[in-house]
Amino acid sequence: MENKDIRNNLKELSEALSKSGDQELIYNFLECLLTKNELSEVASRWALVKMLDNGMSQRKISAELGLSLCKITRGSKELQKADSAFKKMIDLI
């Protein structure tokens, strides 16, 4: 799949999710769409973003979640961006 197709499909999916307003539908949709491993990966990445936002050290996050420091560093860099989508999502919860 080409990058423009990926981008268009993700935009379409984002639009549908934002319009739904139904948390249970979104949860069920994600369970249908993603494999157990993919669900686990997404959930652990979201957990690491929340832990970083709460000030937990990268090494402690690595030990608790079993994630590489590379993934955690990436999350940290994204969270620190001026217009961070991670931060905006955290602010929604």
Image (tube, rainbow, N blue to C red):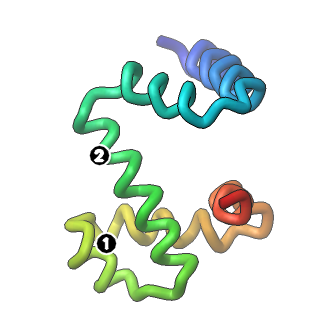
Amino acid type for the residue under numbered disc 2: Ser
Camera-side residue: 58 or 88? 88
**Quarter residue 59 falls in:** bottom left
Instruction: Determine whether, in the image, residue 52 is placed left or right of residue 78.
Output: left
Rendering coords of residue 15 (x, y %): 74, 24
Residue at screen point 40% across, 87% down: 57
Q: Residue at x 65, y 63 (%)?
A: 90
Badge 1 element: helix
Q: What residue is rendered at 45% in x and 26% in y?
A: 28
Which image quarter holds the C terminus? bottom right
Q: Percent x, y for residue 55?
A: 52, 87
Circle 2 packing at 10 Å, graded few (<14), some (14-19), many (20+), is few
Where residue 12 appears, as percent x and y from the top left, is: 69, 18
- Residue 11, compared with residue 43, is above or below; it is above
- Location of residue 25 (image quadrant): top right
- Circle 2 sits on which residue? 40
Residue tagged by mark 1? 69
Report the residue at 54% width, 32% height from top.
24
The relative height of residue 18 versus residue 13 in the rendered view (above or below) is below
What amino acid is found at the position of numbered circle 1 in the picture?
Leu
Q: Secondary structure at mark 2?
A: helix
Estimate the x, y position of residue 30 in percent, counting from the top left.
45, 29
Seen from the viewer's position, the closer of residues 64 and 22 is 22
CA gap between label 2 and label 1 equals 17 Å
Please count the marks in the image. 2
